[in-house]
Amino acid sequence: MGKKVCLSAALVLLALAAPARAATPDDRAAQIVKRMTLEEKVRLSAGVFGCVFRGADGFVPGISRLGVPDQYFVGAGMGVTNVCDRPGKGMGPATELPAPIAMAASWDPKVAFEHGTVIGRETRAIGFNVSIGGAVNLVRDPRGGRTFENEGEDPLLAGRIVAAQLRGIQSRKVAATIKHYALNNGETHRLTQSTNVDERTMRELELRAFEIGVKESGVHAVMCSYNKVNGVPACQNRHLLTDVLKRDWGFKGWVMTDWWACSLPIQILPGDACEPAKAALAGLDQEQPNLTFFGPLLLAAAATGGVPQSRIDDIAHRVIRSLIAAGVVDDPPVARGIDPAAGVEPAQRLSEQTAVLLKNQGALLPLDRRKHRRIAAIGRPAGEDPASVAGSSVVVDSAAPDSALEGLRDVAPGADVRYDDGSDRARAAALARASDVAIVYVRDTAAEGVDKPNLALAPGSDALVSAVAAANPRTIVVVMSGSAVTMPWLGGVPAVLEAWYPGERGGHAIARLLFGDANPSGRLPLTFPAREADLPASASPERWPGTSRRIDYTERLLVGYRWYDTKGIKPLFPFGFGLSYGGRFKYSALKLRRTRVRAPAQVRDGHRLTRVSVRVRNTGRRRAAEVVQLYTGFPAAAGEPRKRLIGFRKVWLAPRRSTRVHFTIDDRALAYWGNGWEIARGGYPIWAASSAAKLRLRKTLRVR
Ligand code: BGC
């Protein structure tokens, strides 16, 4: 007895003396899982039909006796959106933000982070706790239907940008998702096609974007994709889910399926459906939006030993630890409704940082309120809500839609702005002729589930631009597209602004950019080819579009600028390109902290190989942004494309100001996938550049 008292007293003293280590989400989840029944654990592995519960895209009932909350899933590519619940029902309107391709065109993780905070805040405001935006499929071919929902053709840019957005979402205490894992780079055959690709290509390109996205954000969920990878459904792909994601990258969250991926309701081809034991053993944790092969079937598989207890525990653990880590258990969201007014200012400000000025001959832009008084605004997209430009499950029921025309009239109240929808080219040309300046607004179309047949603008647009430009040499083209477009009229037009799908205040953002109230600072996150025949995947139908059953990535590493560079094909506009008003940047004093380094035996994350810095000075007339890009080349032994982006930083500089821009390059930046990550010995040219095609300074790093 005495002994016992003594022991308890000692324990109390110990507890008081050493502040108890706060229980981690993993500790807490482990405690909860211990108290769960098998049925309860399996309950977390599948949604219950989407759209029914508060109109959520997906719903997983919680376990209230143990404090595990219900999970409510809501979409978020361009803002909070719910396929089940629009327009105007229940959830109400939300802030429509610039599309992810535009977010990437900012080349600024701060922009992406803020984009995410708006999504996170509004997700909580409707009382939901899981956000399912976060697409980061690489743009292998710009004809891909969901190009606008992703962050371009380079894994470093795409990964860093999506990671910043996901951190922004999660900073508002919402569990975020990264998707569509993986190799879902086309739409038309996404349900039935197998992406056939070698290990090196996938590790260095698509999976590299996901790896950076996962590791740099601490994202809590991964959505596996509809397609198969090398013949195995992505959601039942042990290599992708367990070997790469969970083992190599150390992902601790949970993996959910895309909606009905590899399940009977949409999996029309025999043999393609997922099976409970196979999928669970491969590493899938949750089926969405409802139970067809998990749920009761998984319970049965567990009961007969087809799936070990430890794996079922792991599923429950992953879901619960992630909800705790996201903050939705200790601080659950309360449905107070979205405050649409709060999103208006950020939507516009973010949009202003994403547009790319592609051409500005004779400094026609920015427009001058005194000189350019009669303005012709031409083309139907000028009169439309720019939010209506994209067609997909990401379309937001926008809280504050505007149009380019409204923006123009608000920003230049003294101007005589005349609008013509462009349906009659001769009439539009006559208006242009009678105006000081003509602005033609054009768009493309894109949607989920179907790829673009080509990169042309909407029918009639090219002829309209040519007719207007012939009538007025001061013609400006504003492109609202979700991907690269072809511009057969480019030579005849002095100015082009790529505004992407700019979100709900896009009209105002565009007008402020045209008048120079904001200085364009975006850069292309994907190459604009001169013609479709130049695209890497145009070389053979196996590469694009493939068949309903397969698509072969035989271009291997030659995606985007890696292709144009290596093949010596001149694009219309290169990756990383963009102009500003009056900014001229001089690069000097490129320094490598060490120019000779030893190849590490094993390439790890975060091992600092070398530091690079470069001085940049604005010798121009206006405050403007430069996106300093760092590329590396490789010794021939590495078998790499000619160059790879290894760093980028956007800096704003006033005239005559300069700054030194610093980069830390870790081993992984120089590694290739051989037997694991390896570094070849030899010389690595390191370029400071202002686009993939405009290299400014070079130094060589020697790896021994
Ligand atoms: C899309 C996903 C989306 C899901 C739920 C699917 O069709 O591919 O991106 O999250 O629907 O809306």
Image: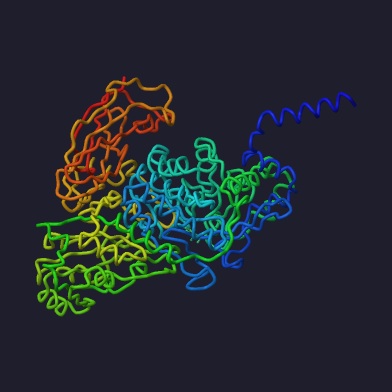
Quarter of the N terminus within the rendering: top right
Along the line of sight, the residue nearer the viewer: 300 or 486: 486
Percent x, y for residue 200? 39, 37
Horizontal side, residue 434 vs residue 332: left or right: left
Horizontal side, residue 665 vs residue 254: left or right: left
Picture residue at 9% right of the left edge, 66% below the top: 473
Quarter of the C terminus within the rendering: top left
Percent x, y for residue 345? 37, 61
Percent x, y for residue 409? 24, 72
Q: Is residue 73 above or below residue 161?
A: below
Image quadrant in which you'd find residue 463: bottom left
Along the line of sight, the residue nearer the viewer: 260 or 689: 689
Percent x, y for residue 384? 31, 73
Picture residue at 56% right of the left edge, 44% below the top: 253
Horizontal side, residue 619 vs residue 410: left or right: left
Along the line of sight, the residue nearer the viewer: 22 or 260: 22
Which scheme is used to colour this image of the protein? Answer: rainbow
Along the line of sight, the residue nearer the viewer: 84 or 636: 84
Q: Is residue 215 above or below residue 530?
A: above
Horizontal side, residue 554 vs residue 475: left or right: right
